[in-house]
Amino acid sequence: MSEPTSAYKGPERVFSGVQPTGNLHLGNYLGAIRKFVNLQHEMECIFCVVDMHAITMWQDPKELRAQTLEIAAAYVAAGIDPEKAIIFNQSAVSGHAELAWIFNCVARMGWLNRMTQFKDKAGKDKERASVGLFVYPNLMAADILLYKATHVPVGDDQKQHLELTRDIAVKFNNEFDVENFFPQPEPLIKGAGARVMSLRDGAAKMSKSDPSDLSRINLTDDPEAIAKKIKKARTDPEPLPETSDELKARPEAENLVNIYAALAGTASEDVLTAYAGQGFGVFKPALADLAVEVLSPITAEMRRLQGDPAFLEKIMTKGSERAERIATPILRDVKRVVGFL
Ligand code: AMP
Ligand code: TRP
């Protein structure tokens, strides 16, 4: 386990979040949720459903509620034990919003202007983006630092936001002259599933908002849908090579090999050792079988849990109480440091 770089002395703690914005996909699973499952045995873990982040883009209230429960179901179905790790929704602990306001006053316009995800999500007409979408990285920093989390498992697309979180922590500590008050949280990104690409375009990441459902494998897809999407995935006519270096100029092929490796828990090189010289006519069905084998039990358990919303709500209520207990003394200290009466 990598150590936070500062001389921070507090306990190790994991925080991460997933937005309840629909279409939970293989990238979310391999880049984030699967890592959560392993980490819960290593340190104290807090896994949030970030509903306040979701509303930075318009969400239908009824769907937001259903999707919040869906993420909770996915967490539990993937193997997170709610008795061990804390599972809750962000808006249930008001400290996230309170600390985010303070960080709005710590972070600089110039820092946020550099965030590439805002540029991607706001699209061409930035004047019409919500202000929340612009300051979203400050809320993310607040999520993490409200618990003084030291480790943050995320996919590669969140790297820049984590750097901003570290900058906010350092600036707060320096300006208020409280050395090592906030840790500089360590991103946990590495691994085969850190950047799962679209099945239709090897240059775009697999995403919840891609209009083409063929671009992603949803955690709610049945085995037929998974097999169909992998069969239709864009590739090239060449057989698989012997080394990963030879995949560099073939992003779609590289993506499928990486997905196989991530699902199998091996290195891409091992996948190539097994399949070098084979075409996609052989490789795709093998990948589809593996994807179904890994994902089907999770999908089935998700469906079962979604049939019992009262159970999921109970988990979240208990989780938010536990989260609040950690956050309350930290927020009290922050307010004192800032000079609030
Ligand atoms: P989001 O869908 O934005 O709520 O993302 C939830 C988590 O999944 C974050 O840790 C992301 O970095 C991760 N994630 C999202 N898309 C991908 C992807 N295509 N590959 C790997 N990780 C991803
Ligand atoms: N911004 C993250 C995403 O879009 C979700 C998120 C919100 C998060 N707060 C977080 C992730 C805190 C890690 C830690 O995927």
Image: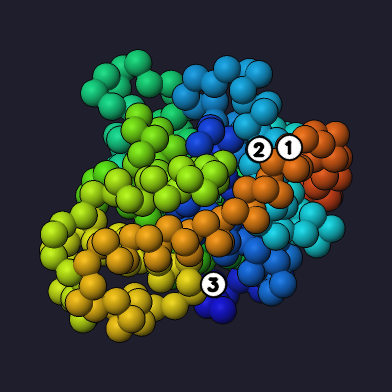
207 left or right, relative to 91? left
Tell me, yes or no, whether the two marked residues, 2 and 3, touch with CB atoms within 8 Å. no
Q: Position of residue 316 (x, y in %)?
A: 79, 41
Indicate which label's residue lies in the foreground, 1 or 3.
1
- Residue drawn at x 30%, y 22% as measured from the top left: 126
Residue 182 to residue 12: above or below = above
Indicate which label's residue lies in the foreground, 2 or 1.
1
Indicate which label's residue lies in the foreground, 2 or 3.
2
- Residue drawn at x 23%, y 49% as measured from the top left: 234
- Corner quadrant of residue 269: bottom left
Distance Cα–Cα, label 2 vs label 1: 7 Å
Q: Position of residue 80 (x, y in %)?
A: 71, 58
301 left or right, relative to 260? right
Secondary structure under tag 2 reads helix
Secondary structure under tag 1 reads helix
Quarter the N terminus occupies:
bottom right
Q: Which comes sooner in the sequence, label 2 or label 1? A: 2
257 left or right, relative to 340? left
Q: Which comes sooner in the sequence, label 2 or label 3? A: 3
Q: Which residue is mark 1?
A: 306
Circle 3 packing at 10 Å, graded few (<14), some (14-19), many (20+), is some
Quarter the C terminus occupies:
top right
Circle 2 packing at 10 Å, graded few (<14), some (14-19), many (20+), is many
Q: Amino acid at mark 2?
A: Glu
Q: Which residue is mark 3?
A: 4
Residue 198 to residue 79: above or below = above
Distance Cα–Cα, label 1 vs label 3: 37 Å
